[in-house]
Each structure stands twice: as C-alpha cells, then as structure tokens.
Image (spheres, helix red, strand yellow):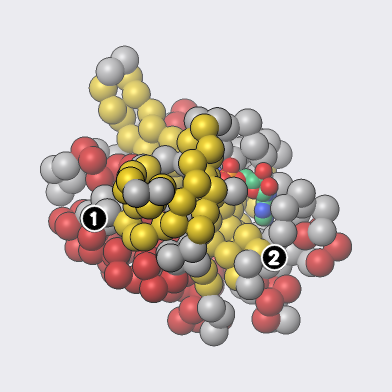
Amino acid sequence: MKSVHLKEINSTNDYVKKHISELENLTFVYADRQTSGRGRLTRKWIDSGEDNLFLTIVIKPTDDITDINLYPNFTQYLSVVLALVLEENYNLKPQIKWPNDVLINGKKVAGILAEGTFDGAKFRGMALGIGVNLNTEFKNLSKIDKPATSIFQETGLIVDKQEFLKQLYTKFCLLYDSFVCDGFKSVKEIYISKANFINRQLKINVFDNIHEGVAIGLTDDGALRLKEDEEINTYCIGDIL
Ligand code: BT5
C-alpha cells in the first residue's frame, strides 16, 4: 500500500490538493488528528480522537480512466467498498444513504467528500476523503449534531486502524479495475442491495430546493430516480432530508 501518515493536519483533503503533483495515484494519506475536517458545503467533520480514521485517497488522471464522467462516481464507489469491509470483516449490516453516507442501524459511521484540483482548466486530480468512526465512544458520539455511531459502539470490539486501512485498501483495489472500466454500473447491484431509501417516500434538498417523491431506483450513473406525482426526475446531486 502506498501511504503517507501524518500526525496532525487541518484536513487530509487539503493536504492532498496541495501536494497533488508529488503524490502517486492511489496513495492513501491519513492523519492521526484532523483539526479542520470538512464535510460538504460549510459542514464539519468531527475528530473524536486519533483511534479514528481521517483518510484521503489520491486519484490522478491515468490512461485507464477514459471517461471523465467516472470521477463524480468515486464517492459512491468508496461507499460500496466501505460497506463491504464492514460487512465482511466486522459482521455488520451497513446501509448506504444516497449519495454516499454509510450508516449502521440508521446512524452515520462514515462520511465521504471528493474534491477536484485544477491547474487553470486542467484537471490535476481528486482528493477522495473519508472519515470513519472506528473507536469513538458513546459520550463523544452523542456530541455530534446528527445520529452517529462507530464500529466499536456497534460491535464492542476495538478496531485496529492499520488493519482497517489494509482491509479498505485491499477492497478498493480489488474492485477498482472493473469500476474504472464500467463505472458505477459495476457496483450498482451491491449499492442497491445496501441502499436504505429505495421505494421510500423521500424529501431531497438540491441547492436549497426541496423535492418530494418516491425513490424508484438509480440510473447506471448513480443518479437518484424520484417519482414526483406523475413525473420521474433524476438527480445526480443532493441530500436526503
Ligand atoms: C460528509 O459531509 O459526511 C463528508 C465528511 C468527509 C470527512 C473526511 S475526513 C478526511 C477528509 N478530510 C476532510 O477534511 N474531509 C474528509 P456531509 O455529508 O456534509 O456531512 C457532514 C455532517 O456529518 C455534519 O454536519 C454532521 O452532522 C455529521 N458529522 C460530522 N462529524 C461526524 C462524525 N465524526 N461522525 C458522524 N457524523 C458526523
């Protein structure tokens, strides 16, 4: 595994964006402490201690990625990879909440944030960030503003961070070639088998516009198909409320 281990950093995504030219594709950059972890928009990612994971995977443009439309799907790809790791190694039943939150028993165990980096108009690469609550205890989970959990909270087992990183890296690489070749379609079936929103009445927020309907499925590109009254609309970005 190509990796960079940092003691403390503001954000592993910022580190990767800053150092993108010297970092190799698929390097795993992780930090023990993250002082300004970010979520989407202006949201924050809470660091509840160094026995949790703050990781950014370096994705660079390579010859095997021929379709630039693949990049937005990396977050959904990573949510599937993580869900499989949780299921196969920790005997958990993870759920995926569109587009890429991973939950256990309805509580968020991980968040994913991808950010592109450009030189003018030239795409230099992507910082594919993920925070996973490995060992957060209940008293710290309860300080988070939305329902949150950790692997430790769900299993009672202390998670070895190095072991977890290895499991994530192995699964990420195992499914990578078919993902690069076929895109979201290659993991769509697994994603849907873990999706907790299909056939449910939902409200989604898309750039501060609320849409309401029944989630009837996903497109081959990972966009949500929402039946609103008699219309079916597809959304490639948004938040389930
Ligand atoms: C995310 O945003 O869930 C993406 C989080 C990505 C974090 C990683 S850590 C490594 C890398 N470096 C960074 O700076 N970021 C990435 P979003 O969908 O916007 O959700 C953010 C919301 O999740 C917050 O507003 C809280 O409600 C909740 N939250 C924050 N910290 C949490 C935690 N530790 N566990 C569970 N939920 C949390």
Q: Residue at x 52, y 54 (%)?
A: 202
In the image, which disc is placed on residue 220? 1
Query: Which SS class for mark 2?
Result: loop
Q: Residue at x 29, y 64 (%)?
A: 188
Q: Is residue 107 left or right of residue 84?
A: right
Report if residue 29 is visible in the image: no
Q: From the Cβ of disc 1, is ligand 1 less than 8 Å away? A: no
In the image, which disc is placed on residue 153? none
Q: Is residue 96 above or below residue 180?
A: below
As drawn, which residue projects farthest toward the right?
Answer: 139
Mark 2 = which residue? 149
Disc 2 marks a residue whose amino acid type is Thr
As drawn, which residue projects farthest toward the front?
Answer: 230
Q: Position of residue 105 (x, y in %)?
A: 63, 72
Q: Position of residue 174 (x, y in %)?
A: 29, 69
Q: Position of residue 184 (x, y in %)?
A: 27, 56
Q: Residue at x 86, y 62 (%)?
A: 139
Disc 1 marks a residue whose amino acid type is Asp
Query: From mark 2 to mark 1, how far is it between C-alphas?
Result: 30 Å
Q: State which mark lies toward you, 2 or 1.
A: 1
Query: Which SS class for mark 1?
Result: loop
Q: From the Cβ of disc 2, is ligand 1 less than 8 Å away? A: yes
Locate the N terminus by quadrant.
bottom left
Q: Is residue 153 left or right of residue 165?
A: right
Q: Quadrant of residue 151?
A: bottom right
As drawn, which residue projects farthest toward the bottom?
Answer: 91
